[in-house]
Protein backbone atom coordinates (compact mmCIF):
# COMPACT_ATOMS: atom_id res chain seq x y z
CA UNK A 1 0.00 0.00 0.00
CA UNK A 2 2.46 2.70 -1.14
CA UNK A 3 4.97 3.74 -3.77
CA UNK A 4 7.23 6.38 -5.25
CA UNK A 5 7.89 9.58 -3.37
CA UNK A 6 8.71 13.05 -4.67
CA UNK A 7 10.91 15.60 -2.93
CA UNK A 8 10.24 15.98 0.77
CA UNK A 9 9.40 19.32 2.31
CA UNK A 10 9.69 19.13 6.09
CA UNK A 11 7.48 21.85 7.53
CA UNK A 12 7.51 20.98 11.15
CA UNK A 13 6.84 18.24 11.84
CA UNK A 14 -17.42 5.26 22.12
CA UNK A 15 -14.03 6.63 21.94
CA UNK A 16 -10.73 4.88 22.11
CA UNK A 17 -8.02 5.10 24.75
CA UNK A 18 -6.47 8.54 24.97
CA UNK A 19 -2.98 9.74 24.21
CA UNK A 20 -3.06 12.76 26.49
CA UNK A 21 -0.52 15.54 26.35
CA UNK A 22 2.42 15.15 28.70
CA UNK A 23 3.90 18.29 30.22
CA UNK A 24 6.48 19.62 30.18
CA UNK A 25 6.86 18.50 26.57
CA UNK A 26 10.15 17.67 24.89
CA UNK A 27 11.14 16.60 21.40
CA UNK A 28 10.91 12.85 21.98
CA UNK A 29 10.45 12.44 18.21
CA UNK A 30 12.57 14.71 16.04
CA UNK A 31 11.43 16.00 12.68
CA UNK A 32 14.25 14.00 11.12
CA UNK A 33 13.12 10.80 12.82
CA UNK A 34 9.55 11.32 11.62
CA UNK A 35 10.82 11.84 8.07
CA UNK A 36 12.86 8.62 8.29
CA UNK A 37 9.94 6.60 9.69
CA UNK A 38 7.66 7.89 6.95
CA UNK A 39 10.08 6.98 4.15
CA UNK A 40 10.71 3.56 5.67
CA UNK A 41 6.98 2.89 5.76
CA UNK A 42 6.54 3.91 2.12
CA UNK A 43 9.31 1.59 0.98
CA UNK A 44 8.09 -1.37 3.06
CA UNK A 45 4.47 -0.85 2.11
CA UNK A 46 5.25 -0.66 -1.59
CA UNK A 47 7.34 -3.82 -1.36
CA UNK A 48 4.42 -5.59 0.33
CA UNK A 49 2.00 -4.44 -2.37
CA UNK A 50 4.36 -5.44 -5.19
CA UNK A 51 4.74 -8.92 -3.69
CA UNK A 52 1.07 -9.19 -2.71
CA UNK A 53 2.30 -10.11 0.77
CA UNK A 54 -0.36 -9.72 3.43
CA UNK A 55 2.12 -10.62 6.17
CA UNK A 56 4.48 -7.83 5.13
CA UNK A 57 1.63 -5.32 4.95
CA UNK A 58 0.25 -6.21 8.36
CA UNK A 59 3.70 -6.10 9.96
CA UNK A 60 3.89 -2.33 9.38
CA UNK A 61 0.27 -1.50 10.27
CA UNK A 62 -1.67 -1.18 13.51
CA UNK A 63 -5.12 -0.17 14.81
CA UNK A 64 -7.57 0.85 12.05
CA UNK A 65 -4.91 0.60 9.33
CA UNK A 66 -4.26 -3.05 10.27
CA UNK A 67 -7.94 -4.01 10.07
CA UNK A 68 -8.36 -2.24 6.74
CA UNK A 69 -5.21 -3.78 5.25
CA UNK A 70 -6.27 -7.25 6.42
CA UNK A 71 -9.64 -6.89 4.68
CA UNK A 72 -8.10 -5.39 1.55
CA UNK A 73 -5.46 -8.08 1.06
CA UNK A 74 -7.94 -10.89 1.75
CA UNK A 75 -10.46 -9.53 -0.74
CA UNK A 76 -7.87 -8.92 -3.46
CA UNK A 77 -6.29 -12.34 -3.00
CA UNK A 78 -9.71 -14.00 -3.27
CA UNK A 79 -10.41 -12.12 -6.50
CA UNK A 80 -6.92 -12.67 -7.89
CA UNK A 81 -6.50 -8.91 -8.23
CA UNK A 82 -3.09 -7.23 -7.75
CA UNK A 83 -2.74 -5.02 -4.69
CA UNK A 84 -2.87 -1.35 -5.74
CA UNK A 85 0.26 0.71 -5.22
CA UNK A 86 0.41 4.39 -4.39
CA UNK A 87 2.39 7.40 -5.48
CA UNK A 88 2.82 10.25 -3.06
CA UNK A 89 3.43 13.95 -3.46
CA UNK A 90 5.18 16.35 -1.13
CA UNK A 91 4.39 15.61 2.53
CA UNK A 92 3.83 18.05 5.37
CA UNK A 93 4.75 16.77 8.83
CA UNK A 94 2.93 17.51 12.08
CA UNK A 95 5.12 16.17 14.86
CA UNK A 96 3.95 16.90 18.42
CA UNK A 97 6.52 17.70 21.08
CA UNK A 98 5.94 14.91 23.60
CA UNK A 99 7.78 13.68 26.67
CA UNK A 100 6.42 10.15 26.83
CA UNK A 101 4.99 7.23 24.88
CA UNK A 102 3.16 6.57 22.70
CA UNK A 103 5.14 8.47 20.09
CA UNK A 104 3.13 9.63 17.13
CA UNK A 105 2.98 12.09 14.26
CA UNK A 106 0.72 12.97 11.33
CA UNK A 107 1.59 13.46 7.67
CA UNK A 108 -0.60 15.34 5.19
CA UNK A 109 0.22 14.26 1.65
CA UNK A 110 -1.44 14.00 -1.80
CA UNK A 111 -1.80 10.36 -2.83
CA UNK A 112 -2.55 8.71 -6.18
CA UNK A 113 -3.52 5.08 -6.75
CA UNK A 114 -1.37 3.30 -9.34
CA UNK A 115 -3.14 0.40 -11.06
CA UNK A 116 -0.85 -0.94 -13.74
CA UNK A 117 0.57 2.46 -14.59
CA UNK A 118 -2.81 4.20 -14.59
CA UNK A 119 -2.81 6.93 -11.95
CA UNK A 120 -5.97 8.11 -10.22
CA UNK A 121 -6.60 11.73 -9.33
CA UNK A 122 -4.67 12.84 -6.26
CA UNK A 123 -6.50 12.84 -2.94
CA UNK A 124 -5.15 14.75 0.03
CA UNK A 125 -4.61 12.20 2.78
CA UNK A 126 -3.80 12.27 6.48
CA UNK A 127 -1.51 9.43 7.62
CA UNK A 128 -1.15 8.72 11.34
CA UNK A 129 2.02 6.95 12.52
CA UNK A 130 2.51 5.55 16.02
CA UNK A 131 5.08 3.74 18.14
CA UNK A 132 4.07 2.35 21.51
CA UNK A 133 7.51 1.99 23.06
CA UNK A 134 11.20 2.19 22.12
CA UNK A 135 11.46 -1.50 21.23
CA UNK A 136 8.50 -1.38 18.82
CA UNK A 137 8.85 -0.24 15.21
CA UNK A 138 6.81 2.63 13.77
CA UNK A 139 3.58 1.60 12.08
CA UNK A 140 0.77 3.22 10.12
CA UNK A 141 -2.11 3.47 12.59
CA UNK A 142 -4.69 5.02 10.27
CA UNK A 143 -5.22 7.09 7.16
CA UNK A 144 -8.13 9.30 6.12
CA UNK A 145 -8.89 11.15 2.90
CA UNK A 146 -9.66 14.84 3.35
CA UNK A 147 -12.81 16.15 1.70
CA UNK A 148 -12.00 19.76 2.57
CA UNK A 149 -8.82 21.71 3.30
CA UNK A 150 -7.05 20.97 6.55
CA UNK A 151 -7.10 24.05 8.83
CA UNK A 152 -3.73 25.44 9.87
CA UNK A 153 -2.11 23.41 12.64
CA UNK A 154 -0.50 25.36 15.48
CA UNK A 155 3.25 25.01 15.98
CA UNK A 156 5.66 25.97 18.73
CA UNK A 157 8.75 28.12 18.22
CA UNK A 158 10.76 25.06 17.08
CA UNK A 159 8.23 24.07 14.43
CA UNK A 160 6.66 21.22 16.39
CA UNK A 161 2.92 20.66 16.55
CA UNK A 162 1.07 20.99 19.86
CA UNK A 163 -0.67 18.03 21.45
CA UNK A 164 -4.14 18.39 23.02
CA UNK A 165 -5.62 16.27 25.79
CA UNK A 166 -8.73 14.18 25.18
CA UNK A 167 -10.50 16.09 27.98
CA UNK A 168 -9.57 19.62 26.90
CA UNK A 169 -12.27 21.94 28.35
CA UNK A 170 -11.58 24.78 25.89
CA UNK A 171 -13.17 22.90 22.98
CA UNK A 172 -16.80 22.66 21.92
CA UNK A 173 -16.80 18.93 22.66
CA UNK A 174 -14.31 16.99 24.73
CA UNK A 175 -12.35 15.03 22.11
CA UNK A 176 -13.09 11.74 23.86
CA UNK A 177 -16.83 12.05 23.15
CA UNK A 178 -16.64 13.15 19.50
CA UNK A 179 -16.88 9.59 18.16
CA UNK A 180 -19.93 8.76 20.25
CA UNK A 181 -21.62 12.04 19.32
CA UNK A 182 -20.95 11.47 15.62
CA UNK A 183 -22.36 7.96 16.01
CA UNK A 184 -25.61 9.35 17.40
CA UNK A 185 -26.12 11.30 14.17
CA UNK A 186 -25.17 8.35 11.95
CA UNK A 187 -27.48 6.00 13.84
CA UNK A 188 -30.44 8.36 14.34
CA UNK A 189 -30.15 10.85 11.50
CA UNK A 190 -31.18 14.52 11.39
CA UNK A 191 -33.63 14.04 14.28
CA UNK A 192 -30.78 13.28 16.70
CA UNK A 193 -30.15 15.97 19.32
CA UNK A 194 -26.46 15.48 18.53
CA UNK A 195 -26.92 17.49 15.31
CA UNK A 196 -26.79 20.58 17.55
CA UNK A 197 -23.03 20.06 17.86
CA UNK A 198 -22.13 17.77 14.92
CA UNK A 199 -22.16 19.23 11.42
CA UNK A 200 -24.00 17.60 8.54
CA UNK A 201 -22.04 15.98 5.74
CA UNK A 202 -21.07 12.72 4.07
CA UNK A 203 -19.62 11.26 7.29
CA UNK A 204 -22.65 12.05 9.47
CA UNK A 205 -26.09 12.73 7.95
CA UNK A 206 -24.83 11.38 4.61
CA UNK A 207 -23.76 8.09 6.18
CA UNK A 208 -27.14 7.89 7.91
CA UNK A 209 -28.94 8.44 4.59
CA UNK A 210 -26.89 5.72 2.89
CA UNK A 211 -27.64 3.22 5.66
CA UNK A 212 -31.32 4.18 5.76
CA UNK A 213 -31.54 3.52 2.02
CA UNK A 214 -30.09 0.03 2.54
CA UNK A 215 -32.65 -0.50 5.28
CA UNK A 216 -35.50 0.48 2.98
CA UNK A 217 -34.24 -1.89 0.28
CA UNK A 218 -34.03 -4.72 2.81
CA UNK A 219 -37.56 -4.10 4.06
CA UNK A 220 -38.80 -4.25 0.48
CA UNK A 221 -37.45 -7.83 0.38
CA UNK A 222 -39.11 -8.70 3.70
CA UNK A 223 -35.84 -8.45 5.65
CA UNK A 224 -34.74 -6.46 8.68
CA UNK A 225 -31.67 -4.25 8.52
CA UNK A 226 -29.86 -2.53 11.39
CA UNK A 227 -26.66 -0.52 11.58
CA UNK A 228 -24.58 0.84 14.43
CA UNK A 229 -21.55 3.14 14.34
CA UNK A 230 -19.56 2.42 17.47
CA UNK A 231 -16.25 3.15 19.16
CA UNK A 232 -13.18 1.01 18.57
CA UNK A 233 -10.35 0.28 20.98
CA UNK A 234 -7.84 2.29 18.96
CA UNK A 235 -5.71 5.12 20.36
CA UNK A 236 -7.08 8.62 19.72
CA UNK A 237 -4.88 11.64 19.04
CA UNK A 238 -5.38 15.41 18.90
CA UNK A 239 -3.44 18.43 17.59
CA UNK A 240 -4.04 22.08 18.38
CA UNK A 241 -5.22 24.19 15.45
CA UNK A 242 -3.98 27.71 14.86
CA UNK A 243 -7.52 29.02 15.29
CA UNK A 244 -7.81 27.58 18.80
CA UNK A 245 -9.69 24.37 18.01
CA UNK A 246 -8.28 20.88 17.61
CA UNK A 247 -7.80 18.24 14.95
CA UNK A 248 -9.04 14.92 16.38
CA UNK A 249 -8.08 11.55 14.84
CA UNK A 250 -9.95 8.41 15.90
CA UNK A 251 -11.15 5.00 14.67
CA UNK A 252 -14.67 3.59 14.63
CA UNK A 253 -16.57 0.45 13.59
CA UNK A 254 -19.74 0.34 11.51
CA UNK A 255 -21.65 -2.87 12.23
CA UNK A 256 -24.58 -3.98 10.08
CA UNK A 257 -27.06 -6.86 10.37
CA UNK A 258 -29.45 -8.11 7.69
CA UNK A 259 -31.78 -10.85 8.87
CA UNK A 260 -35.07 -12.62 8.39
CA UNK A 261 -37.61 -11.50 11.03
CA UNK A 262 -37.02 -13.36 14.31
CA UNK A 263 -34.02 -15.04 12.65
CA UNK A 264 -36.23 -17.73 11.17
CA UNK A 265 -34.70 -19.62 8.24
CA UNK A 266 -35.62 -18.30 4.83
CA UNK A 267 -34.26 -17.70 1.37
CA UNK A 268 -30.53 -16.85 1.23
CA UNK A 269 -29.79 -13.25 2.15
CA UNK A 270 -27.43 -11.53 -0.31
CA UNK A 271 -23.97 -10.90 1.13
CA UNK A 272 -22.54 -7.45 0.29
CA UNK A 273 -19.87 -7.90 -2.37
CA UNK A 274 -17.04 -6.32 -0.28
CA UNK A 275 -17.88 -8.65 2.62
CA UNK A 276 -18.14 -11.92 0.71
CA UNK A 277 -14.35 -12.60 0.61
CA UNK A 278 -14.18 -12.09 4.40
CA UNK A 279 -16.58 -14.91 5.26
CA UNK A 280 -14.89 -17.71 7.19
CA UNK A 281 -15.81 -20.14 4.40
CA UNK A 282 -17.41 -19.80 0.95
CA UNK A 283 -20.01 -22.30 2.14
CA UNK A 284 -21.48 -19.79 4.60
CA UNK A 285 -25.00 -18.90 3.45
CA UNK A 286 -27.24 -16.38 5.15
CA UNK A 287 -30.40 -18.39 5.60
CA UNK A 288 -30.94 -16.56 8.89
CA UNK A 289 -28.70 -13.46 8.96
CA UNK A 290 -25.67 -11.74 7.48
CA UNK A 291 -23.36 -9.72 9.74
CA UNK A 292 -20.81 -7.25 8.43
CA UNK A 293 -18.27 -4.88 9.92
CA UNK A 294 -16.44 -1.90 8.42
CA UNK A 295 -13.46 -0.23 10.07
CA UNK A 296 -13.17 3.56 9.72
CA UNK A 297 -10.54 6.15 10.46
CA UNK A 298 -11.95 9.66 10.92
CA UNK A 299 -10.51 13.12 11.40
CA UNK A 300 -12.63 15.90 12.89
CA UNK A 301 -12.23 19.60 13.56
CA UNK A 302 -13.37 20.44 17.07
CA UNK A 303 -13.89 24.24 17.33
CA UNK A 304 -13.09 26.29 20.43
CA UNK A 305 -15.90 26.54 22.95
CA UNK A 306 -16.03 30.31 22.40
CA UNK A 307 -16.89 30.01 18.70
CA UNK A 308 -20.43 31.18 17.95
CA UNK A 309 -22.85 28.73 16.29
CA UNK A 310 -19.97 26.34 15.62
CA UNK A 311 -20.21 22.59 15.17
CA UNK A 312 -17.73 19.74 15.03
CA UNK A 313 -16.97 18.96 11.39
CA UNK A 314 -15.82 15.51 10.24
CA UNK A 315 -13.35 16.44 7.51
CA UNK A 316 -11.70 13.14 6.57
CA UNK A 317 -12.51 9.46 6.45
CA UNK A 318 -11.32 6.14 5.15
CA UNK A 319 -13.26 2.93 5.61
CA UNK A 320 -12.98 -0.67 4.56
CA UNK A 321 -14.66 -4.04 5.20
CA UNK A 322 -13.07 -5.94 8.06
CA UNK A 323 -15.40 -8.82 9.02
CA UNK A 324 -18.26 -10.89 7.66
CA UNK A 325 -20.38 -13.80 8.86
CA UNK A 326 -23.46 -15.52 7.46
CA UNK A 327 -25.51 -18.37 8.84
Image (tube, helix red, strand yellow):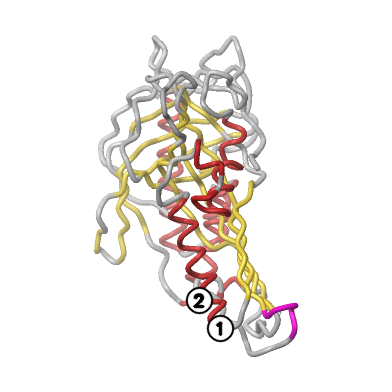
Camera-side residue: 154 or 282?
Answer: 154
Q: Which mark is residue 217?
A: 2
Q: Residues within 10 Å of mark 2 (few under 14, many from 20)?
A: some
State which quadrant residue 322 falls in. bottom right
| Residue beneath the point at 41% across and 52% down | 202
Assign a secondary structure to mark 1.
loop
Q: Which mark is residue 269?
A: none
Is residue 114 shown above or below 183? Answer: below
Q: Position of residue 197 (x, y in %)?
A: 50, 35
Is residue 40 shown above or below 270? Answer: above
Total marks shown come to 2
Which range of residues does the magenta coloring cover?
260-264
Q: Main secondary structure of the magenta part?
A: helix
Camera-side residue: 170 or 85?
Answer: 170
| Residue beneath the point at 45% across and 23% down | 245
Camera-side residue: 25 or 259?
Answer: 259
Left or right placement of residue 258 versus residue 240 in this view: right
Image quarter of the N terminus: bottom left
| Residue beneath the point at 35% across and 51% down | 3
Assign a secondary structure to mark 2.
helix
Mark 1, residue position: 221
Left or right placement of residue 3 versus residue 255 in this view: left
Camera-side residue: 103 or 190?
Answer: 190
Amino acid sequence: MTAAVTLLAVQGGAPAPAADAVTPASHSVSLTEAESAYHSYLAASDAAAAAGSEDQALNIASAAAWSQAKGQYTALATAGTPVPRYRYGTPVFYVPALAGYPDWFVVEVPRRTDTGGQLSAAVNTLMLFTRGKPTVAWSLSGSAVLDQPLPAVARDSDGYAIDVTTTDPTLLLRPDVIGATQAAVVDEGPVSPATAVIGSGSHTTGLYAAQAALGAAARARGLQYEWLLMGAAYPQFELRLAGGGALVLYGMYLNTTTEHPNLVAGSPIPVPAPISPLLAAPTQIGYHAVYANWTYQFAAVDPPSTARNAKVQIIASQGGPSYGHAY
